[in-house]
Amino acid sequence: MQANSGDHLLMHGRVVGQNDREAEIVEVMGTNGEPPYRVRFEDGHEAVLSPGPDSVVTPPEKR
């Protein structure tokens, strides 16, 4: 997975009833666009994470 700052990350729920979560990638901390990423969720909460294979990165112009 590769991303740039400003891209959006969609993390699908892993169990029945769990909602998808969407966040903006604020900082790419890995090399060549690889994880970990610092992300900002819609509520303003920030976290550092390495998304799993059920996640999708979308550039802002494709949203």
Image (cartoon, grey):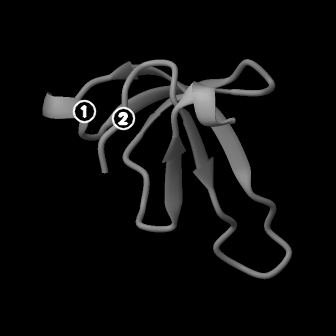
Instruction: Give 37 or 8, whichever is nearer the viewer.
Output: 8
Q: Amino acid at mark 2?
A: Ala
Quadrant of the drawing holding the C terminus: top right
Q: Amino acid at mark 1?
A: Gly
Mark 2: give few (<14), some (14-19) or many (20+) Cα within 10 Å. many
Mark 1: give few (<14), some (14-19) or many (20+) Cα within 10 Å. some
Relative height, residue 57 to residue 3 (above, below)? below
Residue 26 vs residue 44: left or right? left
Considering only order in the chain, which callout, 2 or 1, is on the residue closer to the N terminus?
2
The residue at 51%/58% (across/down) is 55
Asked whether the beta carbons under mark 1 and mark 2 sit within 8 Å of each other, the answer is yes
Relative height, residue 13 to residue 44 (above, below)? below
Report the residue marked by disc 2. 3
Q: Position of residue 45 (x, y in %)?
A: 68, 23
Quadrant of the image occupied by residue 42: top right
Relative height, residue 53 to residue 24 (above, below)? below
Which of the numbered marks, if any, corresponds to residue 33?
A: 1
Quadrant of the image occupied by residue 41: top right
Q: Position of residue 51 (x, y in %)?
A: 43, 52
The residue at 86%/75% (across/down) is 17
